[in-house]
């Protein structure tokens, strides 16, 4: 994964080379620097920059757009943590816990607009295309987040509903990163379509793996408390598949445990009981099979790209890394 690794290194150097944010008022920008400084895999800017290189441009051409998507991604995490009342992010205190909720909201709002400033650093024709893709993605992402919240209160969620929700909430950002990199490189619409579809489908696989890790992963590796989706009544694929496979008794127990009014159930007890049902029904294996299917679909678009075979091999290797990671 040479190009992607080079993109990550180039982006980290870019972050360290200069201060990309104003200094005053510090109460506004310090929380932004804090969450950006918590690190992360830098998957999104790396994909954008690598896509630019794969599409005929240079890695460095994607730096400003890479910063735009990274700061936007962290903005969504900042607001997600408020909505989820999460205590930790990447093993550290969330912004609203370290500072306060109002600071987190306002700093997050600023991050969304800062992203647009960095997309405007390209020539007007490219900037217009980038902003069109970025704005569509941002709206879809908000739709996905709203659906995710709505699903917590609904018992009428299907697996199809879940896949639509995670497509908007997670995968459209990866898809947009791939397309934006291709736009900066001047690639044609057919090429843009294939890289977008690659990003979208690998993003779905990525989210399914994220759901698996949230329920079954090692908290010390994933950087947050395990079982959070269960605590918050998230209608993940694991839960929905369990309902589909369960006996009447298991279904009744799951519905009771996921009842938002079931305040008398201890959180740790709830997580343990749900995990036990999931394990009995082997839903993790079903989730892995679905994840692999979306990875294969993503790879099918890579194979149709008119790029060097070495570039295709890198994208395929990166796909496997994303969907088989342990954190």
Image (cartoon, rainbow, N blue to C red):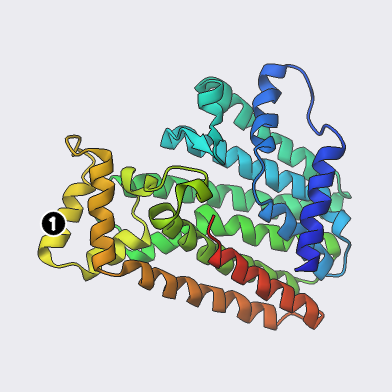
Q: Residue at x 62, y 81 (%)?
A: 300
Q: Is residue 90 left or right of residue 153?
A: right
Note whether residue 160 is visible: yes
**Is 254 or 223 nearer to us in this picture?**
223
Q: Residue at x 28, y 42 (%)?
A: 268
Few, some or many C-alpha atoms within 10 Å of disc 1 (few <14, some 14-19, many ≥20)?
few
Q: Residue at x 77, y 61 (%)?
A: 5
Q: Position of residue 317 (x, y in %)?
A: 67, 73
In the image, residue 112 above or below residue 282: above
Q: Toward which corner of the image does residue 76 lie, by quadrant?
A: top right
In the image, residue 72 above or below residue 47: above
Q: Toward which corner of the image does residue 318 lie, by quadrant?
A: bottom right
Q: How many marks?
A: 1
**Is 89 or 130 nearer to us in this picture?**
89
In the image, residue 120 above or below residue 110: below
Q: Residue at x 56, y 78 (%)?
A: 297
Residue that protrudes farthest toward the left in the picture: 249
In the image, residue 296 above or below residue 221: below
Q: Quadrant of the C terminus?
A: bottom right
Q: Is residue 241 left or right of residue 94?
A: left
Q: Quadrant of the N terminus?
A: bottom right
Q: Position of residue 99 (x, y in %)?
A: 56, 21
**Is 51 or 36 nearer to us in this picture?**
36
User: Disc 1 marks which residue?
Assistant: 252
Note whether residue 154 is visible: no
Q: Position of residue 277 (x, y in %)?
A: 23, 60
Q: Is residue 116 left or right of residue 247?
A: right
Q: Toward which corner of the image does residue 84 lie, by quadrant?
A: top left
Badge 1 element: helix
């Amino acid at each position: 994964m040479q190009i992607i690794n080079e993109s990550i290194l180039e982006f980290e150097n870019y972050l360290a080379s200069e201060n990309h944010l104003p200094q005053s008022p510090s109460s506004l920008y310090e929380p932004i620097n804090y969450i950006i400084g918590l690190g992360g895999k830098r998957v999104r800017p790396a994909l954008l920059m690598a896509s630019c290189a794969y599409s005929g441009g240079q890695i460095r051409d994607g730096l400003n757009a890479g910063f735009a998507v990274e700061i936007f991604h962290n903005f969504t995490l900042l607001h997600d943590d408020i909505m989820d009342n999460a205590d930790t992010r990447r093993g550290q205190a969330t912004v609203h816990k370290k500072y306060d909720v109002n600071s987190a909201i306002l700093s997050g709002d600023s991050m969304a607009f800062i992203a647009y400033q960095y997309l405007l650093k390209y020539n007007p024709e490219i900037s217009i295309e980038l902003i069109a893709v970025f704005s569509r993605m941002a709206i879809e992402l908000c739709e996905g987040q709203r659906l995710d919240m709505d699903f917590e209160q609904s018992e009428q969620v299907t697996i199809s509903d879940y896949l639509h929700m995670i497509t908007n909430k997670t995968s459209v950002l990866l898809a947009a990163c791939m397309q934006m990199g291709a736009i900066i490189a001047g690639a044609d619409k057919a090429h843009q379509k294939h890289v977008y579809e690659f990003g979208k489908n690998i993003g779905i696989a990525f989210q399914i793996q994220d759901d698996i890790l949230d329920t079954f992963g090692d908290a010390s590796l994933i950087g947050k408390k395990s079982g959070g989706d269960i605590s918050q009544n998230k209608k993940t694929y694991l839960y929905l598949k369990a309902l589909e496979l369960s006996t009447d008794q298991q279904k009744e127990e799951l519905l009771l445990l996921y009842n938002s009014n079931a305040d008398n159930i201890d959180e740790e007890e709830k997580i343990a009981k749900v995990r036990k049902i999931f394990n009995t029904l082997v839903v993790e294996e079903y989730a892995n099979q679905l994840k692999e299917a979306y990875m294969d679909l993503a790879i099918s678009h890579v194979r149709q790209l008119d790029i060097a075979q070495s570039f295709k091999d890198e994208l395929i290797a990166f796909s496997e890394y994303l969907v088989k990671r342990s954190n």
